[in-house]
Image (cartoon, rainbow, N blue to C red):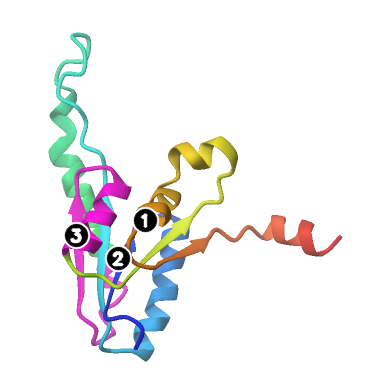
Amino acid sequence: MFTKKVVVAYNDTDLSNDVLDYVHEILEMHAEIELDIVYAYEHPLENPSPFQRNYDDGAPEMLAYAEQIIQKAKNRFVDLPNHVEGFVYDTGPAAAILSHAHDHHADLIVIGNRGTRGLRELVSSVSRTIQTKSHIPVLTFPKFVQEEFEEEYHK
């Protein structure tokens, strides 16, 4: 098999749920592959300015929400014999995914790509950052937009 451990970036969007469906199909065929599902959120700064007191008060709720998201993702794989774990990080998504993949000896990272272009892609794309900084293969799952497909291929 080409991989033993896969890391999937997950954020409970339609795109990341499509990615989980795709990975589920792969795991159905290969019970030996382990799956790590990673959810990352950026923890708010404590008192970033004198006008924003108690800005950090939402941290416990953010963590609880993140844990619910991970459990929801893990539940999609209960029908499979594969070893599936979920991880929550309170740091930037790209850094969390790359560090996790390295620390847990992953062979492949799977991530969705919203399809941003131009300057926005270079500045804010998590998938682009992971593609350029990863030392292991990255499978990027593009957002499929039916309207764009029809415009491009049905002219």
User: Element type at marker 2?
Assistant: helix
Q: CA distance from mark 3 to mark 1?
A: 14 Å
Q: Quadrant of residue 146?
A: bottom right
Q: Residue furthest front?
A: 135
The reply to whether callout 1 and callout 2 are in contact (CB within 8 Å) is yes
Residue 73 got which mark?
A: 2
* Residue 97 within the magenta-colored segment of the rendering: yes
Residue 12 got which mark?
A: 1
User: Element type at marker 3?
Assistant: strand
Q: Which residues are magenta?
A: 74-103
Label 1 Cα neighbours within 10 Å, binned few <14 / some 14-19 / many ≥20: some
Percent coordinates x, y for residue 110 in the rendering: 39, 66
Lower sequence index among marks 3 and 2? 2
Depth check, mark 3 against mark 2: the one in front is: 3
Type of amino acid at the residue the image marks with label 2: Ala
Look at mark 3 in the image and give the residue it sits on: 87
Percent coordinates x, y for residue 69 in the rendering: 27, 56
Depth check, mark 3 against mark 1: the one in front is: 3
Name the residue: 24% across, 51% down: 96
Left or right: 20 with respect to 71?
Answer: right
* Residue 96 within the magenta-colored segment of the rendering: yes
Name the residue: 42% across, 56% down: 131
Type of amino acid at the residue the image marks with label 3: Phe
Lower sequence index among marks 1 and 2? 1
Q: Quadrant of residue 29?
A: bottom left
Residue 151 vs residue 5, the one in the foreground: 5
